[in-house]
Image (tube, rainbow, N blue to C red):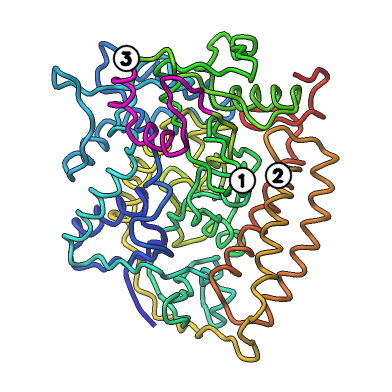
Amino acid sequence: MISTDFLVIGSGIAGLTFSVKMAEKFPDKTIVIVTKASEDESNTKYAQGGVAIVLDEEKDSFKKHIEDTLKAGDGLCNKGVVDTVIKEGPQRFKELMLWGANFDVDGNGDFDLGKEGGHSEYRIVHHKDITGAEIERALLQKAHQLSNITIMPYHFAIDLITNHHVKDSSSSELSCYGAYILDQKEGRIFTIKSNSTLLASGGIGRVYGHTTNPVIATGDGIAMAYRAKAKISDMEFVQFHPTALYELHGESSFLISEAVRGFGAYLRNKDGYRFMPDYDERAELASRDIVSQSIDNELKKSGDTHVFLDCTHLDIDAFKSHFPNIYNKCMENHIDIQRDWIPVVPASHYLCGGIEVDPSGRTTVANLFACGECTRTGLHGANRLASNSLLEALVYAHNIYKYLSENLPKTTDIHIPQWKDEGTTIAEEHVLIQHNLRELQALMRDYVGIVRNNRRLKKAIKRLDLIYNEVEEFYKETKITTSLCELRNMINVSHLIINQSLARKENKGGYFNIDNLDIIL
């Protein structure tokens, strides 16, 4: 067993920001960061667009950014949270720069601000089209300079330890005491006992298979919190990015940043018709839910598999400068954007709901905090405004740090039992896991996608129950593997998405159920 003051599950912007702040403030306290892949593998790493921030109130304003966020959230944002995040954002962003993160500037030395769907002003600070990777680099470099931070890559968090595991707990309050961890290289399971645990575990994109997220985005933190009886809400609000590169083979979808549309690209059908002005006066710069639903409607009408993003009228040199990664990826796929349209399709991108937290990042389980995409803070409401996610992670990581600095948790002497796996065997038929994974992902894409209806949702529940029962039986009989745990987590997440979708009786933001409408688009 390992004992630590603070256990952080996840090594993206949320987990690293919190860890750096706590380690600097309390050099005598220990922080252990557990991450299931390499230390830099996270949703943060793949964020292309940037950080939405108001840096010059003469050219922009907090009021405008707040209004844009509230409009995207479609009436379900917590206005107090929106105000706080947007107004505190500039200070948190300056800290990020002090830690060594670099952002693009123009010829005058001012930030080269981008504009994305739903934004009324140019306010996106970025580093080319690999902003997330630059932030991840800077934060990891800073974390490695602090001796009281230990990063444990290739370690998978299986389950949170709560009163359910600690039989002799004298506390009547539901509390978290750490987590059971799988060392993926050695295959052993051990305990990390912690005075405070932070879930910063990212998103759920792999549940849908076709996603802009990396392979690690399997909703592990949300599923663990759900099994620990934490409150989970707004799971029906899955945001689909409108423009992922359409590829015939492979599940991973390369993201064509929203900033490309902000740069002036047009969406066209196969006949060359620019259809977005038919759906929204903002055309290609409408919010993500509108653009995704519009593309989905076009594809259903035509029977086509994808639409196109036309960049042929844009300044090619400026495009290469702003979006070198996207340009190179297109060229690798034999798409010359000077002459060719880019085939695109919506793909699962971001979850607006998740583990419910208060403004200090506290969950409904004592000593358990959460931050980043795995949470429901109230900032995004029914639909996230582009590039507000990195901003949210920075502000909430600071809020949790501030709360714990003023309320340092007490060291617990509670005995935690070791993980028990007597009677289990090593699984030899991994085909069972892969078959159920493919079936689950197809189920979610076909029945719980961009446009839903109650009939498909109810059928999805029945099919999901069959998968759940088969996987649970397999889980009880075999030794733990990462792929088995991920599948189990994705089943939990799918259950939450489907049931919370059925519970919502009105269409809001990213949630669109045709049975909630008298007139269909």
Foreground label between 3 and 1: 3
Q: Residue at x 42, y 77 (%)?
A: 185
Mark 1 neighbour class, 10 Å CA radius: few under 14, some 14 to 19, many 20 or more: some
Mark 2 neighbour class, 10 Å CA radius: few under 14, some 14 to 19, many 20 or more: some
Closer to us: 148 or 494: 494
Measured as percent of width and height from the top left, residue 381 is found at 55, 32
Q: Which residue is mark 3?
A: 60
Ranked by sequence position, the earlier of labels 3 and 1 is 3
Judged from the image, the secondary structure of the residue bearing numbered disc 2 is helix
Judged from the image, the secondary structure of the residue bearing numbered disc 3 is loop
Against 442, is 68 above or below? above
Q: Which residue is mark 2?
A: 500
Looking at the picture, which amino acid does disc 3 mark? Answer: Asp
Q: Which residues are magenta?
A: 316-342
Q: Is residue 433 left or right of residue 381?
A: right
Ranked by sequence position, the earlier of labels 3 and 2 is 3
Q: Residue at x 80, y 52 (%)?
A: 461
Against 264, is 187 above or below? below
Judged from the image, the secondary structure of the residue bearing numbered disc 1 is strand
Say whether residue 339 is magenta.
Answer: yes
Measured as percent of width and height from the top left, residue 439 is found at 73, 56
Q: Which residue is mark 1?
A: 233
Q: Is residue 315 left or right of residue 514?
A: left
Q: Residue at x 54, y 33 (%)?
A: 241
Q: Are marks 2 and 1 in contact (CB under 8 Å)?
A: yes
Looking at the picture, which amino acid does disc 1 mark? Answer: Ser
Quarter of the rendering containing residue 224: bottom right
